[in-house]
């Protein structure tokens, strides 16, 4: 079995320029596995969320943004399992496609406390359950940090990050995409 050097990505990036920003398959697979671990960690803190997902066990969900994708199967425990794209012969029960082509268009609604534009295809009940998860399940980062570093440092770090996010929200509100100022002046 041939292995790929971890430095080949950097070599290809500099040789082809920044337009070829495609990490190797092993790095994408590992990143997807880490995202699934984080999702499951957050879900395990919310028994009601897991109970909703138990009802959808075995269903296949695909999240896609441009050429990037994440495919998940709902386990009997009400958690997510990572499913490599080529490993499944089943049809996808629900596909969520982020429609924005620009990363800023994905991040700006998130910074404002909203949701990015998503095209939904597939099972309506599964889509409703996933939407409920997005609306109601939150990661308590401060509680996780408190387990590692103690209550006071975790609280101070959490407050600092909240101030930084608030500053980013203010910055995002002051920065407008090209063409939006002319549309407002015409109205």
Image: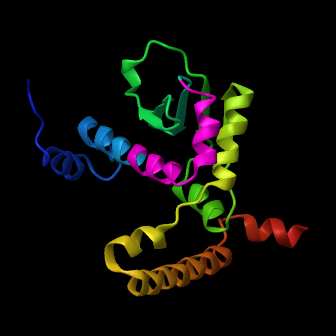
Q: Where is residue 59 in the image (x, y as percent from the top left)?
A: 56, 24
> Which image quadrant is residue 87 in?
top left
- Give me the residue at 46% from left, 70% from top: 143
Q: Which of 186 and 109 is in front in this view?
A: 109
Residue 155 vs residue 95, the one in the foreground: 155
Q: Quadrant of the N terminus?
A: top left
Q: In which quarter of the image is the C terminus?
A: bottom right
Q: Where is residue 45 in the image (x, y as percent from the top left)?
A: 52, 55
Residue 89 horizontal side relative to residue 124, left or right: left
Query: What residue is drawn where x is 37% and y is 20%?
Result: 86
Q: Which residue lies furthest to the right in this view?
A: 187
Q: Name which quarter of the figure residue 109 lies in.
A: bottom right
Please give left or right for residue 39 compared with residue 178 in the image. left
Above or below 133: residue 182: below
Up the image or down, 158 lies above or below 141; here it is below
The answer to whether residue 67 is above or below residue 60 is below
Q: In this view, does 55 lie to the left or right of 154?
A: right
Query: Where residue 27 sits in the image (x, y, percent)?
Result: 26, 43
Tell me the quarter of the picture where residue 61 sits: top right
The answer to whether one can see residue 32 in this image is yes
Is residue 39 shown in magenta?
Answer: yes
- Give 173 or 33, whichever is nearer the viewer: 33
Magenta span: 36-57
The reply to whether residue 67 is in sight is no
Instruction: Please name the predominant secondary structure of the magenta segment in the image.
Output: helix
Q: Position of residue 183 (x, y in %)?
A: 81, 65
Callout count: 0
As drawn, the residue found furthest toward the top would be 89
Q: Does the magenta stretch include residue 63?
A: no
Q: Which residue is drawn at 19% across and 48% down?
A: 15
Residue at 69 percent across and 34 percent down: it is: 127
Establish if 44 lies above or below 108. Answer: above
């Amino acid at each position: 079995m041939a292995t790929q050097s971890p430095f080949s990505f950097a070599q290809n990036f500099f040789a082809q320029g920044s337009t070829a920003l495609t990490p190797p398959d092993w790095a994408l697979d590992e990143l997807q596995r880490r995202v699934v671990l984080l999702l499951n960690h957050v879900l395990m803190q919310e028994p009601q969320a897991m109970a909703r997902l138990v009802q959808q066990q075995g269903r296949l969900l695909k999240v896609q943004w441009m050429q990037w994708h994440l495919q998940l199967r709902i386990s009997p425990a009400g958690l997510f399992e990572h499913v490599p794209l080529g490993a499944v012969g089943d049809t996808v029960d629900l596909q969520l496609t982020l429609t924005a082509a620009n990363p800023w268009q994905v991040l700006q609604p998130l910074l404002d406390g909203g949701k990015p534009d998503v095209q939904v295809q597939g099972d309506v009940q599964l889509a409703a359950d996933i939407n409920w998860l997005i609306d109601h399940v939150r990661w308590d980062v401060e509680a996780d940090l408190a387990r590692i570093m103690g209550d006071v440092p975790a609280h101070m770090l959490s407050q600092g990050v909240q101030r930084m996010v608030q500053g980013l929200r203010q910055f995002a509100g002051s920065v407008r995409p090209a063409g939006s100022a002319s549309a407002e002046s015409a109205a």
